[in-house]
Image (tube, grey):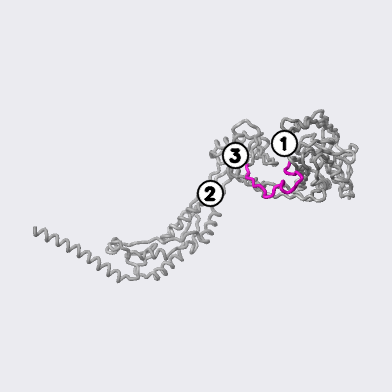
Amino acid sequence: MKKIENQGNIVAFFVIGVLVGLILLIGIARITWHTKFYPGVSVAGVEIAGLTREQAFVKLSEVTNAYQVELIFNGGGWETPHEAVMFDAQSTLNEAYQYGRRSQIEDYLLLLVNKRTNYPLQIAEGKTSKLEGLINEIASNIEIPPIEPTIEVVDKDIKVVNGTDGVVLDTNLLSQRIEESASYLSSEPIEIPTTTAKRQLTAEDMSQLRSKAEKLLGKDLGLTLDDERLRLKADDLIALLATDGGSEMLNKQAVEEYVSGLSESLNKEPRDAKFEFVEGRVKEFAPGMDGVEVNLQLTKSNLESGIEKLLSSDDKSLTIEIAVTRTPPKVTTEKVNELGIRERIGRGESYYAHSIANRIYNVGLASARANSALVPPGAEFSFNQTVGEVSGATGYRPAYVISGGRTVLDDGGGLCQVSTTVFRAAMNAGLPITERWAHAYRVGYYEQNSKAGIDATVYAPSKDLKFKNDTPGHVLVQFINDPKNLHLVVEIYGTADGRVATMSQPKIWGITPPLPTIYQDDPSLPTGTLKQVDWAASGAKASFEYRVVRGEELIQEKTFTSNYRAWASVFLKGTGQ
């Protein structure tokens, strides 16, 4: 029993001795290495044991400032510039300095066996300009841009050209490898990482792409927003197909870019109404208009759904709505006038491409003079009276008109473009047309966005265009001329009374061939110049039915007819200086 007690005392004394020895060791170490790094401590392989923090920082800075590492690729290489990586030496030294000073027994046990402890250098966040410059230089030397596959319609046939793969520098992985190497000041060369940009399609992918494109041949997709009418033909639709060989039918980026372009052209701020009535005439008028902002996501979804439906069905043509968000104006039209002009009730448009300069000028002048014409309830609108005298004395220039069965220069040529557009607007508004004359022959200007038979010629005083205002309020006729795009719009504003106008598709019959080409001398053109001003037109008869109803009540029913003579192409031969 006594023997066991002696053994216990020996163990206790031994443990106490070890603890006392360890405390003495810690105390001696603390005194000996006061303000210095403990033995065996290094940073990124740089020995700093026995140094103060200031000494260690100077020593470490000398090494880091001179640090470089080689980057290799396919037998070539680059060397990182000095200070390409920003080291956080102070934070690293702070961490290393805590070794032996923490309340952790393992630190002191490691001191007993002189265990070496190496701390990696901490790297500051972000890339330096030197490192970014190096990466950009490497990319410009080793990257091979991929070539995208293409698909297009050539002579009504689908042509698919395969793409080629590219080589792309993996900049993130390269930066990571450089920082990892720098954290240990490693001199081992770094292999520059790259990735393959896959663009080359398999034979099966190309076959599937061709098959999708063939389903779109002869098809089109319309997009509508109020008066805007856009149409994507087969070529446009095929250009939106995905060519990456994946599971997606459409190129999402291409669709997004198209819709984004739509928004740039269609977005508009709300416009407050303006109305000023002075001495029986409208001096200034601007209808209140909603602001429009294209809903990119919904329009993109509608567009994708429309194309996918064309791909999966036998439909030849579809129309989708452009989705928008509308913002009403602060001041509406009905708040700024007392004449009953509250909303647009009719609209007509025409194009006049291929017009000579004087004709374009006359269209603009006549539109300006007839603009803001106000027609009281029960009154009749006369185009000739509204425009006024047409002659050189009133500012009109000579342009080509139909006279005596020929195309000749006369003051005011182009007025029929304006009268035709007014005719279309009045019919769209459901107003009674009390006088209308068809042209002697089919004129190309009036069939650029319409079929034959929807025109109205004027020639004072014998031929006029007239309509009656049988609405409960005044009507206002507004002209919007765009000489850049050779586009004229006439809008009629008033009070909607529930009437709905419809017009049948024109019927055309009795077609006769065009006449032989005509050449006319023109002293306004230099000698040797040949300019076409009329295009050959077949003779024909045309008619369409015009009906206006309000609920169950039939307000108007009329057949408009036109009897067009055959016409020839007309070329002007310059005879002037």
Q: Specify few, some or many for label 3: CA neighbours under 10 Å numbering under 14, 14-19, or 20 or more.
A: some
- The residue drawn where x is 33% and y is 67% is 38
- Amino acid tagged 3: Glu
- Amino acid tagged 1: Gly
Dot 2 corresponds to which residue? 167
Disc 2, SS: strand
Disc 1, SS: loop
Note whether 226 is above or below 176 in the view shown. Answer: above
The tag earlier along the polypeptide, 2 or 3, is: 2
Dot 3 corresponds to which residue? 304
Percent of width and height locating residue 345: 74, 40
Q: Nearer the viewer, mark 2 or mark 3?
A: 3
Residue 338 belongs to the span the image colors magenta: yes
Along the line of sight, which residue is nearer the eye, 535 or 374? 374
Residue 239 belongs to the span the image colors magenta: no
Dot 1 corresponds to which residue? 498
Percent of width and height locating residue 211: 59, 34
The quarter holding residue 96 reads bottom left
Number of numbered callouts drawn: 3
Whether the residues at callouts 3 and 1 have beta carbons within 8 Å, the answer is no
Note whether 120 is above or below 148 in the view shown. Answer: below
- Region rendered in magenta: 323-344
Note whether 265 is above or below 71 in the view shown. Answer: above
Q: Is residue 487 in view? A: no
